[in-house]
Image (cartoon, helix red, strand yellow):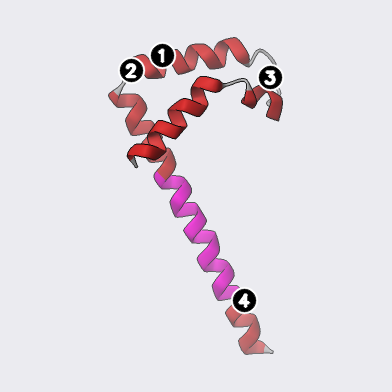
Amino acid sequence: VIEANIDVIAETTVLLFAGTTTTISTLLSLVKYLKAYPEVEMKLIAEIDTELTSPELSLNAIKRLSYLDKVISEALRIL
């Protein structure tokens, strides 16, 4: 039973860190992309300012951010 618990803990730890690494890589790629293309960054900021008028973030609000979706897709493409 103890060995099984250790295996579960080990697998969970691997999954946690693997997911974290992927997320960090994606975010870093996105930041590098935005810094390389300041016009894209400004357009993205304008879209966020226009679409997110409420302080509460919702799934519907995020779905309205079509330019953000395109920017993330491009950052992932060049990753």
Residue placed furthest toward the left? 36
As measured in the structure, the alpha-carbon distance from the residue carrying label 3 to the one carrying label 1 is 20 Å
Q: Amino acid at mark 3?
A: Pro
Name the residue beneath numbered marker 2: 38
Q: Amino acid at mark 1?
A: Met
**Quarter containing the C terminus:** top left
As measured in the structure, the alpha-carbon distance from the residue carrying label 4 to the one carrying label 1 is 45 Å
Name the residue beneath numbered marker 4: 8
User: Which sits in the foreground, 54 or 70?
Assistant: 70
Residue 55 is labelled as: 3
As measured in the structure, the alpha-carbon distance from the residue carrying label 3 to the one carrying label 4 is 40 Å
Residue 42 is labelled as: 1
Which residue corresponds to the image point at 41% horizontal and 14% vertical from the top-left? 42
Count of numbered tags? 4
Sequence-wise, the earlier of marks 3 and 1 is 1
Q: Are marks 2 and 3 in contact (CB under 8 Å)?
A: no
Q: Please rate how many residues cluster around mark 3, counting C-alpha atoms within 10 Å: few if below 14, some from 14 to 19, many from 20.
A: few
Sequence-wise, the earlier of marks 2 and 3 is 2
Q: Are marks 2 and 1 in contact (CB under 8 Å)?
A: yes
Give the main secondary structure, helix, strand or loop, of the magenta stretch.
helix
Magenta range is: 9-25
Q: Name the image quarter holding residue 9.
A: bottom right
